[in-house]
Image (cartoon, rainbow, N blue to C red):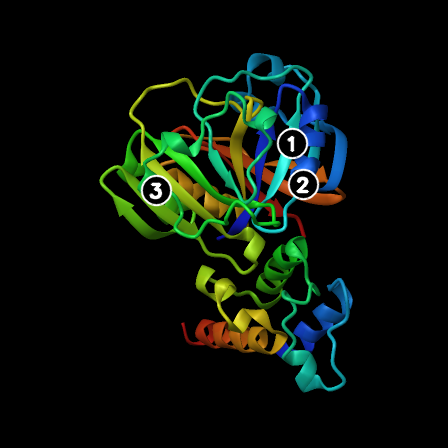
Amino acid sequence: MNVKAEVLRYFDARAQAPLPGGTEEERLGCKYLDQGIVDSMGLVEMITSFEALFGIRFSSEDVQGYEFQTPGGLIGLIEKRLAEKGTS
Amino acid sequence: MILGASHLTFAAAEPAEARRLLIEAGFKLEFEQRRVPNSPEKAPFLSPSARAAETLDISYFKGDRGPALELVAYPSPGSSAGRQFIPLFARGLPAPLRAGLPSWESAPKAALPVATAGPTTTEQGLIALACPAQDLAGSISFWREGLGFSASGGGADWARLELPAALPQWRLKLSLFTDERSTEAPTLDGLGFRCLSLLSSELEKDLELLGRTGAVERSAPFALTVNGKKLRAAVLRGPGRELIELIEVVR
């Protein structure tokens, strides 16, 4: 499964507003929580949706961490959890 | 996993007046919902009169910071008996809303959060909660291991905890302090600040964990729709008989 494509598809389809930026790099670096692109209820839905889609579990530390604040960081985090799952 | 603090529930003898005063105090009315079905699973946590009610009304307020406030109105006002949370608001609350409610003066001075807003702040919102505990060590364990709070300070008869969260409005400071007096169990419809609602990503798993870390009573999960959102929730009592609601957003 292409994690980047799935994450960006989720933001395109479900976020309150589109990710800003003219380039993919800008979109991946967007601080979506600070910018209100995902609101509080949307964030809860996003976490549970990604956990179900990728078959992973985020930890409290994941959700509270810096990586979680941008789509790019989130993709890295999901890939890390998938790699752990594959080796466990 | 507990994602953060959603809101603190408030019940007042005169809900319409409380609504007006909360807006005057700087809270913004986010939405109101009339005739929300009163789930039978909540019965053990309600007074007999509220148990008989088929519905309740809710008004949901947001401040500039911190978790939201949910004003609940049952057909008849609840009792003022039993322990409750003691909130600390950035700009305080108008005197009529504070009348008859416990204040932070009942907690040890050291338990107050270090960084509180000054009296001249223009922001309104919930900064911190104090919660009396009959068994301080048991309560600390419940809030830390069961609900994901981390310790930020403490003394012989108090502890300061914090709930970290992805969103600033989900974060909350909590001060637990020893109060060995035995009182009757608070109810969800009781006057004052009776229930803290927390967001859960896995309701059953979090309920099971809380059962192992000191919850003394738990409801079965129940479904509800609030402001168009489909939710699942459960109510439980912590070791100090404090009321906690867990909310899970249905995908």
Snapshot quadrant of residue B73: top right
Give the distance between the C-alpha atoms of the residues marked 1 and 3, in whole angstroms.
Answer: 27 Å
Among numbered discs 3 and 2, the one appearing first in the sequence:
2
* Tally of numbered discs: 3
Where is residue B139? Give x, y as percent. 33, 38
Residue B244 in view here: yes
Task: Give above or below for A52 relative to B11.
Answer: below
Residue type for callout 2: Phe
The residue that label 3 is drawn on is: B111
Residue B131's disc number:
none
The residue that label 2 is drawn on is: B61
Where is residue B220? Give x, y as percent. 53, 33
SS of the residue under disc 1: strand
User: Depth check: A43 or B39 in front?
Assistant: A43
The furthest residue to the left: B156
Q: Are marks 2 and 1 in contact (CB under 8 Å)?
A: yes
User: Depth check: A71 or B77 in front?
Assistant: B77
Q: Which residue sits at x=57%, y=58%?
A: B167
Give the distance between the C-alpha atoms of the residues marked 3 and 2, in whole angstroms.
Answer: 27 Å
Is B236 left or right of B233, judged from the image as shown?
Answer: left
User: Nearer the viewer's eye, disc 3 or disc 2?
Assistant: 3
SS of the residue under disc 3: helix
Is B50 left or right of A62, judged from the image as shown?
Answer: right
Chain bearing mark 2: B
Residue type for callout 3: Ala
The residue that label 1 is drawn on is: B71
